[in-house]
Image (cartoon, rainbow, N blue to C red):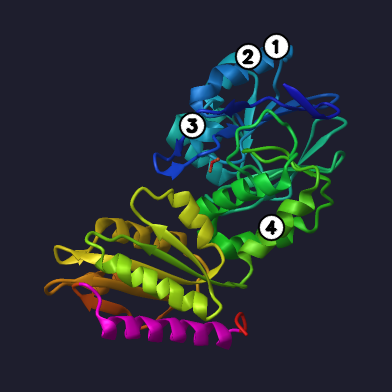
């Protein structure tokens, strides 16, 4: 248990060893499940719990700190990495009421079978007094589930936004010490789960601007004593601005597609465009997700596997489609040996993107001079598009 302000404590758990979230998202730096204890002069509140794998850490922290009573257990978000230990906390502190919104309550009943009479439901903006401290609830939907809310503590000017602004970073440092490192971890987190919700996040940022915030205490990663750092980062990520960058994500079986990618990347670089190239075999999809947060263009490279795209390319396309980056232009390059539907199927997998599709380039077998010329033309078209939107001189 660590004190972040007078009578405000961090009581959650650090998970240095976790390497995947949702059995999908890589966590190269581990994570933490932050829970916060607020002791008011009359009532005590616990904000969130921890992942069920770390329940014992949370309970030990509470017992060691001599916490005899919890009046309110505020649940900001029903996902189990924050809610999963609620049943055990309620067993240890049976007097506690779970404080949340109606949508989160319904989810907690579905996911954890918490009894209906354990809940107190609150509305957006509602306040709950702990005596000399006040919990003010702020609904921040779609970061990244629909029910998510935060709590503002006006006496201390601390905002507890749950996943919002979080970083998957296991560290014993309570506060952010190394902003560039936390920036990367927070951007990875944004890229992997928040990116599809740019519009609601913009609204949430606007709503938060009405609060005087001196500290942001998220549910993953260290606490921000300089909140503007992470607020500015989020403003940048959710803005409509894109960078003069092309992400080339590809897979090659017999070097035809690889030869095309190498030529194409050089053609883009010659035209003043920054390129990031990802071989999809063994790629950390978090790195790819970070890269597509603000790149203007994404190009997927694939050979034809049976009749369609290589499964690794199809996966990259599906992931990109699900994450809905603000990418303005997409294209496809690749190869085939006999008839196939690689381009048609990949294009279909990218249907969610509000991006212009630039004519793909496909080679029959090893690329020939005419294919390299077509790749030069594609690079030139992309350069023209980047100039049109003012990101390339
Ligand atoms: Fe950290 Fe959406 O849970």
**The C terminus: image quadrant:** bottom right
The response on whether ligand 1 sits within 8 Å of label 3 is: no
Element on which disc 1 rests? helix
Q: Is residue 355 visible?
A: no
Q: Residue 361 in the image: state x and y as whole percent.
A: 30, 79
The residue to which callout 2 is attached is 60
Give coordinates of residue 96: x percent, y percent: 65, 23
296 w.r.t. 250: above or below: below
**CA gap, disc 3 and disc 2:** 20 Å
Q: Are marks 4 and 1 in contact (CB under 8 Å)?
A: no
Q: Could you say which quadrant of the image residue 310 lies in? A: bottom left
Q: CA distance from mark 1 to mark 2?
A: 6 Å
Viewer-nearest of discs 3 and 2: 3
The residue under the point 14% across, 63% down is 306
* Disc 3 element: loop
Q: Is residue 360 above or below residue 77?
A: below
Answer few, some or many: residues within 10 Å of disc 1's Cα (few below 14, many 20 plus, some between 14 and 19).
few
Residue 189 at x, y percent in the picture: 56, 48
| Between marks 4 and 1 in the image, the one whose residue lies nearer the viewer | 4
Specify start and end residues of the magenta stretch as a single range.
366-389
- Give the vertical position of 186 relative to 34 (above or below): below
Q: Is residue 71 left or right of residue 388?
A: right
Mark 4 / mark 1, whichever is N-terminal: 1
In the image, residue 58 lies at what x, y percent?
A: 61, 21
Residue receiving disc 3: 18
What residue is disc 4 on?
233
Q: Which mark is residue 64?
A: 1
């Amino acid at each position: 248990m660590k004190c972040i302000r007078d009578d405000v404590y961090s009581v959650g758990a650090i998970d240095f060893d976790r390497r995947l979230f949702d059995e999908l998202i890589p966590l190269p730096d581990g994570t933490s499940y932050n829970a916060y204890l607020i002791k008011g002069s009359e009532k005590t509140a616990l904000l969130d719990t921890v992942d069920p794998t770390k329940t014992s850490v949370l309970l030990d922290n509470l017992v060691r700190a001599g916490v005899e009573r919890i009046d309110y257990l505020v649940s900001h978000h029903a996902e189990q990495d924050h809610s999963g230990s609620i049943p055990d906390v309620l067993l240890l502190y049976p007097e506690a009421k779970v404080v949340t919104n109606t949508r989160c309550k319904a989810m907690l009943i579905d996911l954890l079978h918490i009894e209906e009479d354990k809940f107190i439901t609150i509305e957006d903006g509602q306040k709950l007094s702990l005596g000399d401290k006040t919990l003010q609830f702020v609904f921040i939907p779609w970061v990244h589930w629909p029910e998510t809310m935060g709590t503002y503590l006006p006496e201390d000017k601390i905002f507890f936004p749950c996943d919002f602004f979080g970083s998957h970073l296991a560290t014993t440092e309570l506060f952010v010490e190394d902003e560039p490192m936390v920036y990367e971890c927070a951007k990875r987190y944004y890229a992997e789960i928040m990116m599809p919700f740019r519009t609601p996040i913009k609204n949430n940022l606007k709503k938060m601007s009405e609060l005087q915030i001196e500290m942001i205490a998220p549910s993953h990663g260290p606490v921000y004593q300089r909140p503007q750092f992470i607020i500015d980062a989020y403003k940048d990520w959710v803005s409509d601005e894109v960078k003069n960058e092309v992400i080339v994500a590809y897979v090659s079986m017999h070097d035809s597609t690889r030869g095309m990618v190498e030529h194409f990347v050089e053609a883009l670089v010659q035209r003043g465009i920054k390129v990031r190239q990802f071989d999809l075999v063994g790629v950390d999809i978090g790195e790819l997700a970070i890269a597509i947060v603000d790149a203007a263009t994404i190009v997927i490279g694939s050979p034809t596997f049976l009749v369609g795209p290589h499964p690794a390319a199809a996966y990259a396309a599906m992931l990109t489609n699900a994450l809905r980056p603000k990418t303005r232009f997409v294209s496809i390059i690749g190869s085939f040996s006999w008839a196939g539907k690689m381009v048609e199927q990949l294009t279909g997998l990218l249907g969610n993107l509000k991006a212009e599709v630039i004519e793909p380039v496909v080679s029959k077998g090893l690329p020939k001079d005419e294919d390299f010329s077509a790749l030069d033309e594609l690079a030139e078209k992309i350069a023209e598009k980047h100039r049109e939107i003012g990101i390339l001189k």
